[in-house]
Image (spheres, helix red, strand yellow):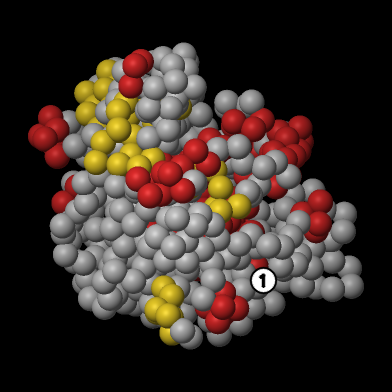
Amino acid sequence: MTLFAMGFLLVILQPSSGQFPRACANTESLLRKECCPPWDGDGSPCGELSSRGFCQNILLSQAPLGPQFPFSGVDDREDWPSVFYNRTCKCEGNFMGFNCGECKFGFSGLNCTEKQLRTRRNIFQLTTSEKDRFLAYLNLAKNTPSQDYVIATGTYFQMNNGSNPMFRNINVYDLFVWMHYYASRDTLLGGSNVWRDIDFAHEAPGFLPWHRVFLLLWEREIQKITGDENFTIPYWDWRDAEDCVVCTDEYMGGRHPTNPNLLSPASFFSSWQVICTQSEEYNSREALCNATSEGPILRNPGNNDKSRTPRLPSSAEVEFCLSLTQYESGPMDKMANYSFRNTLEGFADPRTAISNISQSGLHNALHIYMNGSMSQVQGSANDPIFVLHHAFVDSIFERWLRRHRPMLEVYPAANAPIGHNRENYMLGYDYEYLQEPGVLIPYLEQARQIWAWLVGAAVIGGIITAVLTGLILTCRKKRGTSEEIQPLLIESEDYNNVSYQSNF
């Protein structure tokens, strides 16, 4: 996939998926409610002396939310990240990161001026050495402590409003497992009371862009620990598959010879320990997942409830989903009809686009089919098949954007479930099987993208750690008849100046 810069990291979602920068996980930062760490290059907050960025008050959206969450002021993720920090780094130019110390997606070099071309590939098209390298990278991530981020092990209230920080170290792979858990966890209401009908990353408009940025951040962290700047997550094209063809020891782990719920001991994934899978226990203890090991990966593909998911998705179902013209509709949640997002997510029938939560289609079908760790939302990222699956789901999103070229207005500005109103924009990228053979893909002739305040450069897991603002791109059309690739999200004032405006 050709990675262009991504529009900012709250990806339409006020809360997205982020982490606590280690530099801000301390009493001083929490009590000051400020996360503006110095950039190592010049020692100034947000790299201000090098014109990388500056410390700024965050601006909270005032748009009304949908009725799905009937509370206010009870969840740390509300008005993210203001519970923890209300001043964060706003990055300029092609810089991003919690201290503006990195290049935004699609750029590299000392001053982040060099454009990059990266391609996500079908895992079965990788050479043996490329495939083995990918598996080794995943294993390395599972065994390498994150240098930049920690996770929260308590709520802000449990931290005594910041005076008693509760954080711990975590490895790079599990950092993203925890982020996915945190974005989808239940709201603790006190005592034994919880509110389960809440999710900052699923069941609403932000599902697709949230996971898009989530994968990009995951790729970025693996690039950093391996030194392989060209690394991308491969995808598994599961259309019309009769079984889990990646479930072999050569790829993502075969079935255990004596226990069908476990992975084969010949796969190093069999030694992996899962985290964040015991949601009811966390709720009963009024606690957050603290990343304690909870046992091996579970997987028993194909032995799922056939009345809910009889088979893996078909090509025809994907094509029908792509034919839907509305990104979102109705209540903008899992009951939405004729919604591309809800149909691709799997709460609507992939043959009619009518909501049917008793069935699991497309994206959801894969999770249910795996019949194990993948089948529970909060802990699903424990199984490495997760990244292959979501890379392919994201490619379907990309196909829809190119086919329908929607305007920003099709994404709801207000009244979506909490965390899913339109706030920020995102750019897209390309996938190998979407490219025309032998045709060079043109880049944007001029790319001026201003990345805004990395809001949660600070902050909690599960909700994106940055708020990148402002995207201004001057685009060049591709000559000839082959498909043009342009930014998927563009600032509203540019709408009339470009021909391809896929804005999510």
Residue 468 image-quadrant placement: top left
Q: Percent x, y for residue 401?
A: 31, 46
Q: Percent x, y for residue 49?
A: 34, 16
Image point (47%, 17%), residue name: 41
Q: Is residue 338 visible?
A: no
Q: Is residue 456 visible?
A: yes
Q: Percent x, y for residue 305?
A: 61, 82
Total label count? Answer: 1
Position of 462 compared to 130: left or right? left
Image point (33%, 39%), residue name: 88
Position of 197 compared to 138: left or right? left
Q: Percent x, y for residue 364?
A: 50, 68
Front-most of residues 126 and 78: 78
Q: Residues within 10 Å of mark 1 (few under 14, many from 20)?
A: many
Front-most of residues 103 and 162: 162
Front-most of residues 430 and 376: 376
Image point (58%, 41%), residue name: 233
Specify the amino acid type for callout 1. Answer: Gly
Q: Is residue 200 above or below residue 219?
A: below
Residue 195 image-quadrant placement: bottom left
Per the image, the residue denoted by label 1 is 372
Position of 249 compared to 472: left or right? right
Q: Is residue 143 above or below residue 477?
A: below
Image point (42%, 55%), residue name: 162
Front-most of residues 34 and 275: 34
State the SS at label 1.
loop
